[in-house]
Amino acid sequence: MVIFSVYVVNKAGGLIYQYDNYVPRTEVEKTFSYPLDLVLKHHDEKVIVSFGQRDGIKVGHAVLSINGVDVVGKSTAEGKDILEYLKDPVNYPVSIRFGRARLSSNEKLMLASMFHSCELFDQNLKGALEVAEKAGNFGAGS
């Protein structure tokens, strides 16, 4: 069994510690001609594939680099918006590397909050079951 991440959450639901085990990302690099046959969109400070899976590129994969230069969020290294850059036919042929982007700090906090909510639900459910067991049988024929 492999542990991918460790999250330590306090009783109030705050993230105390988080560790990501390094897992090599599956990355796919492909050269495209104009027009681009994938549909890309902005999502949480990233540009992701929203439609059009092919050649190992899957929906949800993020743009990691363009022409061998890593992208910074929604922008190229030169500061141009990635979607605007890819709309211009002058920039083709273009080599784009796709893969799963790492979780942002905000996404890690949301994930920790979800774990906390699940734990609270579990504690409340256990308490309710104990009360029901003490009260006796319920249902038809009781």
Image (tube, helix red, strand yellow):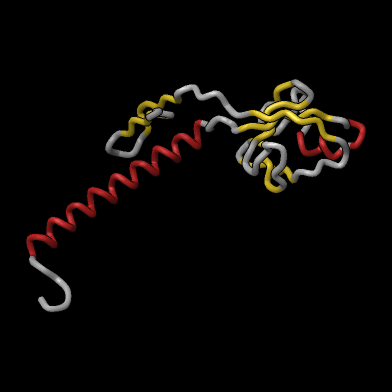
The quadrant holding residue 139 is bottom left
Q: Is residue 127 left or right of residue 9?
A: left
Nearer to me, 134 or 22: 22
**Residue 55 in picture, x, y percent from top left:** 71, 37
Residue 27 sits in which quadrant?
top right
Q: Residue at x 37, y 26 (%)?
A: 17
| Left or right: residue 57 compared with residue 141 | right
Q: Residue at x 87, y 30 (%)?
A: 93
Q: Quadrant where the C terminus lies?
A: bottom left
Q: Position of residue 2 (x, y in %)?
A: 40, 28
* Image side of residue 49 versus residue 22, left or right: right
Residue closest to the far right: 90
Q: Position of residue 66 (x, y in %)?
A: 76, 27
**Vertical arrangement, residue 101 with respect to residue 117, above or below:** above
Residue that lies at the very extreme toward the bottom in this rendered image: 141
Q: Quadrant of the image for the N terminus?
A: top left
Q: How many marks?
A: 0
Question: In percent of the image, x 45 and y 40: which residue is there?
Answer: 110
> Residue 40's x, y, as percent?
72, 43
**Residue in the picture at 18% in, 58% down:** 128
